[in-house]
Image: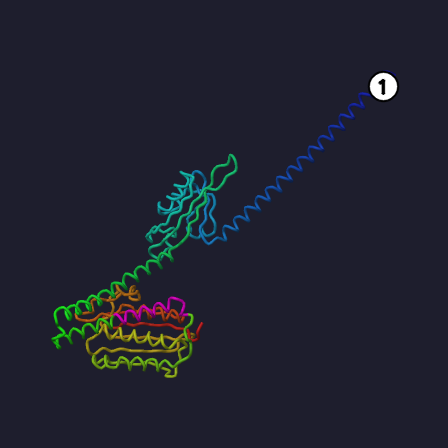
Amino acid sequence: MTTEISIFATLAALVALALLAFRHRRSRRQSEAEVNAWKLRLELDLQQARDERNRLLDALGDAFVLVDSDANIRFANEAARALFGARELLNRPVSEAFLDPRLAEALLRCLATGEPVQSRLVLPQQTSPRGDLENRGVNAWIIDAARLSNPPGGSPTTRVIIRDVTAEHQLEQVRKDFVANASHELRTPLAIINGYLENLLDDDMIEKPEMARRFLTIMRKHADRISHIVEDMLVISRLESGEASALKIEPFPFHSCIKDILERLESVIQNQSAEITITLPDPALVIHGDRFYWTQVLFNLVENALKQNPHSGLRLEIGCEAAGENVRIWVSDNGVGIPSADLPHIFRRFFRVEKHHSQQEIKGTGLGLSIVKRAIEAHGGTIGVTSVPGSETKFLITLPKEPR
């Protein structure tokens, strides 16, 4: 009896032990499942956070990269990938990713010191971060680097923003050039006027009527030049200051515009025995635009052709025709032409093809073709020029039939 009780107690203990083991295994499996579920949820949350971060950083207009303590790129947003084109960025040292080492200097300084660094760079076209995509010539960039706060024990990460400020740089250069050129252009005639005034007053030239008249005639020419320069600068200022949006757009017959400018230049045309041809397949062709500016455009182009070719026998053509949704306008002549090296620059302010001027001539303001280009662009059009010296120089304007 005692033996049977002992056996029963042993079996009961074994059953209890097996039950405990089973419960322990089930509890461990449940714990492992819960841990795995938490791990999966955490990974999904982290991935969702990364995706949200990437979407936000890709929405930035500036290039944004994250760099580790070894100066290797760990993240690049869409703007950075687009900026550097086909070049691989991730996991590459910045010294390899950037074509010009000056781009990496600010970042490396930040990595070395831990202090925020911002620098402005002006680079030649060959070393632009855009590589072969760069076609703007000199380009300007702001490099902004700063170390991010890191969790305890984590390695430092540095964020770098690369901002393209080429447009602002070029605008500033245009402003500086404009001020410098305008000052130079105004200073020359003013110096001449002052010189003749001194002669008139200090040398008693007023008592010599013939000499005084000659001096006054020269002074008047240079005073007219100053007036033209100021007037042309005001026209450019109106076109570029936003007043172009207030153009008085209305239809007008183009032939009347041609008639107006030929009447204004009639004496010059007769003196040079120039031959003017008007090509107008549709005499009733109507232009939609501000007639004041279109008169300026046509006047400057025709006057420019006459000034550049002061010899007699110049043949000049003014034409206008419909071309699908556009209107084509041209002014061409068979004069001395424009050297090919000068063609890319002729619409720049104060640029002149000097070789056609004698020392005795009062030069033009150098603003006429710049006014032409700005006025045409204000109307949504484009202008181009081709020239074969001694054969044909042609300014071709393409303009939408209807205002946009």
Q: Which residues are magenta?
A: 226-244
The residue at the point 20 percent across, 66 percent down is: 191
Q: In the displayed structure, does residue 322 sit left or right of residue 309?
A: right
Q: Quadrant of residue 216?
A: bottom left
Task: Check residue 227 for magenta coloring.
Answer: yes
Q: Amino acid at mark 1?
A: Ile
Name the quadrant of the N terminus. Answer: top right
Residue at image mark 1: 5
Q: Secondary structure at mark 1?
A: helix
The quarter of the displayed image where residue 11 is located? top right
Which of the 4 image quarters holds residue 97?
top left
Is the image coloured rainbow, by chain, by secondary structure, or in one colour?
rainbow
Taking depth in this image into account, of 218 and 173 the one nearest to the observer is: 218
Badge 1 crowding class, 10 Å Cα cut-off, few under 14, some 14 to 19, many 20 or more, is few
Quadrant of the image containing the C terminus: bottom left
- Residue 46: x %, y % from top left: 57, 43
Name the residue nearer the viewer: 377 or 189: 189
Task: From the top left corner, tell me how far across and down residue 290 is, in percent.
Answer: 39, 76
Residue reaching furthest top?
A: 2
The overriding secondary structure of the stretch rendered in magenta is helix
Q: Residue lying farthest bottom?
A: 283
**Is 251 one of the magenta-colored residues?**
no
User: What number of labels is visible?
Assistant: 1
Residue nearest the viewer, comparing 404 with 24:
404
Who's the residue at 18% across and 73% down the image?
218
* Residue drawn where x is 11% and y is 75% of the image: 208
Q: Residue furthest right?
A: 1
In the rendered view, does 201 fall on the left or right side of 62?
A: left
**Residue 278 percent across, percent down from the top left:** 31, 81
